[in-house]
Image (cartoon, rainbow, N blue to C red):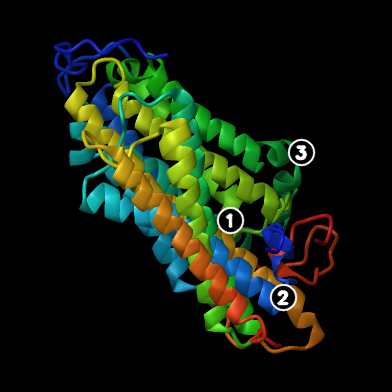
Amino acid sequence: MADPPCPGTRVMDHLNHGAASSGPLSWPASDVVILVVLTAAASGYGMALWVARERGRWPVHRALFWYLGLMAAGAGLVGPVAEAAHSSFTAHMTGHLLLGMIAPVLLVLAGPITVGLRALPVPAAKALARMLRSPLVRVAAHPVTALVLNGGGLWALYATDLYPLMHASPVIHALVHAHILLAGYVFAASLVGVDPNPHPTSMRLRSAVLIVFIAVHSILAKWLYANPPAGVEEADARIGAQLMYYGGDAVDVMLIVLLFAGWYSATWRRHSTDGVKPVRGLRRGARSASPRRPDADGKEPADPGYRWSRQES
Amino acid sequence: MSTVKPPENASSLEPDRGTILSGFLFGCGIAASMIDLFIFHLALHWHHFYDLSTTEVALTVDGFFHAFGWFITIWGLFLLADVRRRAEVVWARWTGAVLAGVGLFQLLDGVLNHKILGIHQIRYNVDLLLYDVVWIGSAVIVLLLGAFVLWRTRHARARV
């Protein structure tokens, strides 16, 4: 449970940007690290596409998603929104939406693992595929694990003293933000990922996980409206909580649509075995974008969507 | 009413049942996620975003209501798309099912949320009796209207 808010003590009033801080990282240094990581991600994706240009066309919209996703993450981490987030809960929530919800969905839709598999030399690609098939990844990338990390992280941030702590220490700040982005990515990938998934889960399970997540997110937003985190003023908390509620809704609706779009094309493939032509269908870039590469056993499975899986689903 | 199956099996529904289920889910869903939000919260400001008197149970139930509302709205639309690619949709039957869904949800909302759980009232600082009668009465009328349309179109089923 959160401490009762104490009006008058603003978290960040005594911490000026650029002032000497207690941690080994100071604010500007962490900004540099963030920019270096984002630039590496941007150039890595581009280089991988260049290396694999012989492998056929990669859909332009996927590359676009990658760069938009990096921009969303960057906007949440450095610049005016991140700057204002040190003193304003509403700005913090704007950055959180960008970093924890919008960026992960865009990055997942860019299919970075597929891009990597296309570009890597065969031994390295096989090693990566082996790693993806490992039990550790199966557990870590399971929708329920991702749900707990994502939802639990949110509760921990807002219902404990983590929120004020985060703004007092650049190291905790960096760790919390890294967790938000990574947990968001794994969560989105486990539900609506376009990359080959060696551990596919059922539509039923993914639906249940998504419903629980949406419920938790909206319950937390309304709870924050009435119980601001330590050191946040009431009016600020109310605007931030409503932003979390309605902004979260917009992204959640996108996730549901993507989940059903996957179901829609998968069920049609199951139907079309009886030779009926679809009257109407959604265009899918994901299938054609799969890497043309034999799997670890050296044979080409029938369905490129599950190219790296042991069992044919 | 057909039994609700998980989405995985939904595509094997025969087209008429798919049409009914799609309309019903979509009707419940728009009543839950849009009618309440756009008309009563945003346009009329009759409901608050959050009543400070809300209990934790009510908050939790409301959160799940909210999640299901969006989920079944979109599920209903994708089911409709699935029926369309396999057969001709009988729009009258779909519309009847939508009306039945809207009516049933508003009835649940009016009785369970407003009266039993007390999540929020329709309006504040007014005598609620008239509002409750209109809300629950209109829900029953819409539900019956949907059922009537479904009964009238019972011979016009979708064929593959």
Chain where mark 3 sits: A
Report the disc number at residue A135.
3
Chain where mark 1 sits: A
Q: Nearer the viewer, residue B139 or A287?
A: B139
Q: In terms of image quadrants, where is residue A99?
A: top left
Residue visible at 68% across and 47% down in the picture: A205
Q: Are marks 2 and 3 in contact (CB under 8 Å)?
A: no
Q: What is the distance, in whole Å, between disc 3 and disc 1 at their CAs?
A: 19 Å
Disc 2 element: helix
Q: Residues within 10 Å of mark 1 (few under 14, many from 20)?
A: many
Q: Amino acid at mark 2?
A: Arg
Residue pointed to by mark 2 = A269
Residue visible at 54% across and 57% down in the picture: B72
Q: In terms of image quadrants, where is residue A89?
A: top left
Residue pointed to by mark 1 = A193
Q: Position of residue A168 (x, y in %)?
A: 28, 16
Q: In terms of image quadrants, where is residue A171?
A: top left
Q: Nearer the viewer, residue A303 or B132?
A: B132
Q: What is the distance, in whole Å, between disc 2 and disc 3 at their CAs?
A: 29 Å
Q: Are marks 1 and 2 in contact (CB under 8 Å)?
A: no
- The answer to whether residue B80 is above or below residue B56 is below
Front: mark 2 or 3? 2
Mark 3 or mark 1: whose residue is earlier in sequence: 3
Disc 3 element: helix
Q: Amino acid at mark 3?
A: Pro
Q: Are both tags, 3 and 1, on one chain?
A: yes
